[in-house]
Amino acid sequence: MSKIFISHSSRNDQEAIAVKDWLVSNGWNDVFLDLDPKRGLAPGEHWQEALKAAAERCQAVLFLISKDWVGSRWCGLDAFMTRAAMLLIGAATLYLLGGGPGAAFAEARKSLPPGFVYLKDIDPTIVQDIRYATPFNFTGAPVPGYGAECVLLREVAIALKEAQDELRPQNLGLKVYDCYRPQRAVRAFVDWVKKPDAKGDERHYPRTPRADLVKLGYISAASNHSYGTAVDLTLIALPTERAQAARRNDYGACVAPKDEREPDESLDMGTGFDCFDLNSRNPALLGSSDAEAQKSAEKSELAAPPLEIQKDQRDRRLQLFALMKDHGFKGIGAEWWHYQYTRIPRPLKPQDFAIPAAEPRSDRSGRLRSGARPSS
Ligand SMILES: [Zn+2]
């Protein structure tokens, strides 16, 4: 049962999503929003009936009042249904008219295009280590368009939260290295390969010629990351309160034993992240019949030498694969850390917006107060 029903005008979809995200990030998981892919209306469902049924089940209603809300007879219907059912236990009003907290939400979120969210607003417990925002990546320098924040399509972030929830009882969690990737960053990777004299960090490709990185599929002219559907991640032992592994630069190649390669508090997967090497292959996809995995396999010579990793490292890759598969992701043959979400039915476009740094959560959360008065 959804305990909170958000009544809003369709012209305030983004503000409604922002309010819902805030509620979820503060523990109010049971929210009905007709846009929500999991809890909202199913395609083809008779929406007036479904809305009525949802409103009757809810214990509280949030009215997002704006000029559009006032002018919408369907929103008026929401209010009527709530009164008629005598179910209105508590209602808060969020004024979206100039300067109110709803407008502050819209202001905070307008830096992301519709549909995209900050992962930490959906699940702040997932550890983030966005390597392309730092010099600690294969190019040896921060990558254009990056801020140190994981941004994803909303459905993908929710799926990660659900995976994180499943891991928690095992004292495990997720750590993400890369999420949405602007197209300008993808272009920068291709340009980097084309300039053999450009600075690079060979510890990420100690046994693979830099000129072969495109041919082998590690770098390409287009990326699912630019759609906000792909994520690079690993497993980490809880609790995660401890500081991230200290940054230092005197470490070895990504194929070296864990205590010799780049410091990383994650579980040992046998190689580091972004290790362009045959030992980075995903054991779950060796010999896969999946066409895309096979294509990735051929590029990375998947069938060639056996994976030279230990059994516990292999088992962890398989554990991550099984978890991600259960939550709607598929892997690729060449990289154990790369997963793409497959359950978004609508057509998507690659994006090129730069990743802004998110505001601290406390700042944004503090702006939501019920009953605030409009400034005009
Ligand atoms: Zn990836």
Image (cartoon, helix red, strand yellow):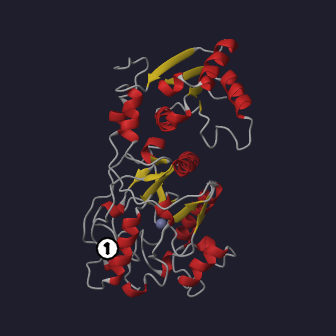
Relative horizontal placement of residue 67, taking residue 246 as reference (left or right): right
Tell me: residue 200, above or below residue 351: below
Taking the spot 52% from the left edge, 21% from the top edge, the residue there is 70
Q: x%, y% of residue 168?
A: 53, 46
Is the CB of the residue bearing disc 1 within 8 angstroms of ligand 1?
A: no
Q: Looking at the picture, tell me which residue is in the foreground, 270 or 116.
A: 116
Q: x%, y% of residue 136?
A: 30, 67
Q: Give the crowd class for mark 1: few <14, some 14-19, many >=20 residues within 10 Å.
A: many
Q: Looking at the picture, tell me which residue is in the foreground, 183 or 152.
A: 183
Residue that numbered label 1 is attached to: 139
Taking the spot 63% from the left edge, 78% from the top edge, the residue there is 294
Q: Secondary structure at mark 1?
A: loop
Q: Quadrant of the C terminus?
A: top left
Q: Looking at the picture, tell me which residue is in the foreground, 146 or 119.
A: 146
* Quarter where residue 29 is shown: top right
Q: x%, y% of residue 150?
A: 41, 53
* Quarter where residue 289 is shown: bottom right
- Residue 132 at least partly seen: yes
Q: x%, y% of residue 358?
A: 35, 45
- Residue 253 at least partly seen: no
Tell me: residue 232, above or below residue 289: above
